[in-house]
Structures are given as C-alpha cells and as structure tokens.
Amino acid sequence: MTARSLSAGIGRSVDYDRLLNSLGAWALALIWFLPLIYALWTAFHPGEFATRFDPLAPLTLDNFARAWEAAPFARYFLNTVLLVTFILVGQFVLCTLAAYAFARYRFPGSSILFTLVLLQLLVMPDILIVENYATMRMLGLVDTIAAIGLPYIASGFGIFLLRQTFMTVPKELEEAARVEGAGPLGVMLKVYVPLAKPTYLAYGLVSVSHHWNNFLWPLIVTNSVETRPVTVGLSVFSAVDQGIDWSIITAATLMTSGPLLIAFLLFQRQFVQSFMRAGIK
Amino acid sequence: MSILKKAGMLAGAAALGAMLSTSAQAVELQFFFPVAVGGKAAQTIEDLTNDYVKANPDVTIDAVYAGSYQDTITKTLTAVRGGTPPQLSVILSVDMFTLIEEDAIVAFEDVIEDGADQAWLDAFYPAFMDNSTTGGKTYGIPFQRSTPVLYWNKEAFAEAGLDPETPPANWEEQVEFGKKLTKRDADGNVTQWGVRIPSSGFPYWLFQGLTTQNDVILANDAGNETNFDDPKVIEALQYLVDLSTKHEVMQPGIIEWGATPKAFFEGQTAMMWTTTGNLTNVRENAPFDFGVGMLPAKVRPGAPTGGGNFYIFKDSTDAQQKASLDFIKWISAPEQAARWSIATGYVAPRPDAWETPAMKEYVEGFPQAKVARDQLEYAVAELATYQNQRITTILNDALEAAITGQKDPKTALDEAQAQADRILSAYR
C-alpha cells in the first residue's frame, strides 16, 4: 500500500473511528456497571425480588442489617484500613528509595539487581504462600496485620513503575537543585517525588484496591477477629452447600466495597486529571 | 506524609497488641473450621465451643473460621508446613489421604486409652466411617457429614397430575415424571424444568450418586485405583447428559450449585438433587410444601456421603492431643450432635443421637430429616484417592466436557482414566 492511499484511508475512517470508540466505551461501561446495578437492586429489596424485576417492589435496608450482624464488620473495616495504609506507606517509602537508586545511580550489579526485581513480577504470589508463612512465623508475626502486609511491601511493580517515571525527569532539574545545595535525599524529595505525583496516585489506587480485595493470604496468616480484614468477613456468605442468598451477599458486598467506590467517585476528577498530566509530560 | 506514617505506626502497634493478647493457660487448642452452610453454622460451632470451655476451665479453645473447605485445607497445610499446625480441624473426609501423606495427622487409635473410647469409635454409622478409616486405623471423626437427597415440590407434582407424596423411584420414572413436570410457555421456552442436578465446581459428587445406583464404585478403598472407564460409569454419565439433551427435562449446560435452592424456591425446577446440608435452608425458605426422598435407583438405590471430619494433628503435645480427643468426644456426643444436626441439616453421625428427646421431637415435626439417615444404608464412601485434588479435578473436567457437549461420555471418561492412572501408578 502506498503512503497516499494509506493517509486517504485514515482520513475517511476518522468518523467511524470516533463512533466505534464511543460505542465501545459505552458497551464496556455498561458491562462493567451491570453487576453493580444488579447488586444495588438486590441489596435494597427483599429476597423474593432477587431475580425478578418489579419497579414497585418494596425497598428495604433489612439485608444490610442482617449482613452487618453476621460478622464483626466494624472491626474488620478498621483492620482493612490499617492494613492498606500500612502497605501503602511501606510501599511508597521502599519503592521510592529503590527506584531512585536504580534510576540515577550506577553501582556494580545494578542491572542484575534490577532484573531480580523485575523477576518478582513473574512470580505468582500464591506460590509463595508457604514460604511467606514460614517467614512470618520465624518473625513471630503470624496473626498480625503486619504479617498480611509485609510480603507485599517491597513491590517489584512499584519499583519498576517509579524507576521509569524518575528516568523521564530531566537531568537539568536535578543539577539545578544540586547547585542550590540539595543533597541526594533532598533532590529525591524536592525534585523527583513531586514530579512523579501522578504515578504515585495511580500506583496507590491500584495498590489500595488490590489489598482491599485480597482474601486468601489474609485468611491463612490470621486467626482472630482483631486482625482479619473485611474480605474474610464477606466469605461467610458464600457458602455453596446452602445455596447463596443473593440479597445478603450483595448487601455485604456493597458495604465492603462501598468506601472504595465512594472514594473513587469523590476523587475521580483528581485521578483523571493526574493521569492526563502524566500523559502530557 | 507524616499522618500516613503515624497511621502506619498505629497499625504496627495494633498488630503487636493482637500478638500479645493471646494469654497463657493450661491447655490451649487451636481449632480450624470451615463453613459451607451459611453464617449460622459458624455461630453454632462457636457456641458449642464456648459451652465446652465453660464446662472445662482448664482448656481454652481458639475456634478459627477458615473459609470454605478448600480454603481450610489450604490454610491448614500451610500452617503444618510452616510448623504451626492447629491441634484439631474439620476438613473434608476425602482429604484424609492428603493429610496422611503430609504426615500431618494421628490415628485415633493412637490417642484413645481404653475400651470405652473404642466403643465410642465404633458407634458411628459405618457409611460415614468408610471415608474415615484406612489400613485398619481411624483418622477422622464424622462431624458435618451430609449425603445428597432428592427434594421435590409437592404443589408442582399435584399440578402435573402426579401423586404429590411419591417421588420417582428409579431413573426411568425420573425421566417420565420430569417430562410431565417440564412446563413451556407459548414460545417454547421452559418455565419449569423437571429436575436439576447441579454440576458446577464439583460435579463428581452427585455423579457418584448415579454411578453408585448403577452398582459401580469410582475408586478402590486403598485410594490408588480408579474405574472411570467402566462401562457402567459411562452409562451413568450418558444418562446425566441425556436428561438435558435427549429427554429435555433438565436445563442444559453446567448448573450452578449456589443458585440451585433459589431455583427450587422460585419454581424454576420441580425436583432438585442437593445435599442434606440444605435441609434447614429449604425448610425455612420454600414457599410451598416439599418432600425429601432418596435419590432414584437404577440397579440399586445409592448415594455418596460427603462433608467434613474432625482430625487431630500430630505436631501437638500429648496433653493437647488428649484434650482434643476429649473435645471431639464431647461435641460428637448425642446431645451436641443433635443440636448441630437440627441447626444445620447435617446428618447426625451416630444412631444414639437420633434417640435424644430433642432429635425425636425435631423428626416428629419434620419427618423429612429422617430420609438422609435412612439412605445411609445404601451410601458409599465419597471418592477419595491419593492426590485427591488432582484426581477429582481430572474427573470433574471430564464430566464438564461431557455435560457441555465438548466430548462424548466415553471419550471423556477414557481420557480421564488414562490421566488418573498416570498419577496413581506411583501409589500401587
């Protein structure tokens, strides 16, 4: 195909492109939203309307009350919040320091070390459950919130993401800061970290939602109400032997994912903006 | 940032507090339990445990909810390999071989002391002990045990001109009844199916009902040889597939376990095969009169047993093992077994539990509860082999391939047998 016919083809297809894009976006949004709509419908109506649509069906909060009573959710919520905060702070500190070193310093073995970090991305965390458990036991941390979080703190993904972002920061900015008398840590905190804010935001979002939803590892490494996160409380409802009570399980799901959803809706402008700014730079 | 740091330190402090709060007492037991029948079961187990601790102040029991059966075995094996096993746990009876292979559990014969204890061991229903003993030793004590039964909607039966008190007695009748019970609307869409045999996740269990009725076993007692390619097994699978393809009395494709009771309550199916663990749920939620019967027979009546056993773990002190045994003896005693059975619908695993006043009263008001017990006479051990997870996965995959029409039953089962042989030949 010649260059001319190629560009003509592109010119003609622009409108279709847009149309297809919007159609695709709507379709994806709808598919994504359907379970949520179903959950909202089921959670606020009595059980007999779970699989029947009737616009006049009576509304009720009974499902939420029953779900709330079925497990100590207040405590579980506190645990989950402590857990994701602990992990996020830990990840930010460790990943920033590691990424800064990998991005701006040449030291012997740096590429081998960085390859090792990348290798971490290839290992399924579930494979490491037994090893991680043994480590936590050695540290005497079994059945603590720290034990749930520690294996995730040195995140290979976080280090990789931040290193790539730091590499795009112009050297001149760093040099200017050095001239002003900033040391290595000062440069990192005053130049690199502020410029990588969108990356931090994006990574924080992924990290928080992942650990908010994590189930198997917390279930295995904890035993008591004082340390267990909401997902463990949620699992009480998915007992297949008895058949699933959709009303209660959707109410509980909305309850546990609610804080995240609300936070996202509140901050979505900042999120989207920060992603866009990251794109422009 | 500094606020976040403070929160992190708080988290650390809270974690430390949680760690230190475990107090030291005479005998401490950790007890993992799965929940497969809804939140109320967890409450009942915790209540029973608390009652025991109250009566026995020299023992503390930390009852830990460990998720589904699958989660529980994962959690337990992780803890065993990590060097901190629980002292006792309820785990699927079919995981016995896995636990033995991991050298994680002890035989009850090695913990019990005298003839009275032996008599206690001998008092459980033999059908439940099939899955709990191997090589002449007992490794599991039946606790939350179930067996599949047939539930039918009496109103739907009456409407279809069938006797509401008589369930289908055999495979042919099940098809015949099913045809009468299947209702279609003007467009030919089915509004009510005749029967529903759930097949998601672990289709092998109900399938084992069919094979037992066809008088064939799926695996030998030693757990190292399977019979998946036996012509009778193939015939059973053909019947299951025919229910939806040839006779059109069952919804085609994979049928969800979790959604099955709901489909029954809402009249989408007139009969369902499911576990007795559902009895209390159906009793509380079915808006119509329902019957519970044994599964229809072919050559003979038959069903597998299922559910969880108590195991005692090896890596505990003698005092802990003794205390564990004592607790298991208490919780499986007639009064407690009856209480547990009434709360959940699980089959009380000992004849004497059915003689308690509470149980008698319950059965009088709800005779459906007796069916599962009476069916035990024809029940066989649930499929259990070495490498049980892998073998059942192979069979499940074959069944799903046949149910969804990707393979014909014979090909699917022949292939499954070949794969199973490859794994099990190491154990012969």
Image (cartoon, rainbow, N blue to C red):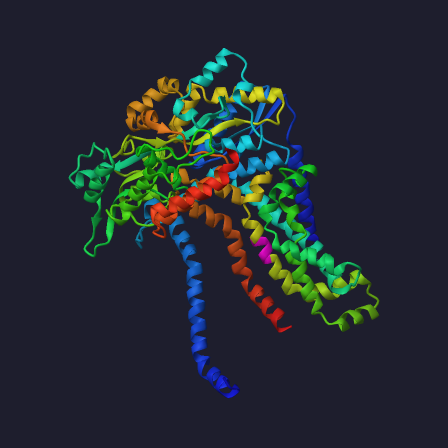
Q: Is residue B315 above or below residue B418?
A: above
Answer with left or right where residue A170 lies relative to residue B266: right
Answer with left or right where residue B98 lies relative to residue B41: right
Q: Residue at x 30, y 53 (%)?
A: A54
Tell me where residue A166 sits by quadrant: bottom right
> Residue B111 at x, y = what percent?
56, 19
> Residue B74 at x, y = what percent?
54, 39
Q: Residue at x 46, y 83 (%)?
A: A9
Which secondary structure type mostly characterizes the magenta part of the structure? helix
Residue B116, magenta (yes or no): no
Furthest residue toward left: B161
Q: Is residue A65 visible?
A: no
In the foreground, B258 or B217: B217
Of the 4 image quadrants, the one containing the N terminus of chain B is bottom right
- Residue segment shown in magenta: A205-209
In the foreground, B86 or B97: B97
Q: Residue at x 23, y 33 (%)?
A: B169
> Residue B103 at x, y = what percent?
58, 30
Q: Residue at x 51, y 32 (%)?
A: B97
Q: How many marks?
A: 0
In the foreground, A214 or B51: A214
Q: Is residue B5 above or below residue A168?
A: above
Q: Is residue B281 above or below residue A173?
A: above
> Residue A37 at x, y = what percent?
40, 56
Q: Is residue B289 above or below residue A204?
A: above
In the foreground, B211 or B89: B211
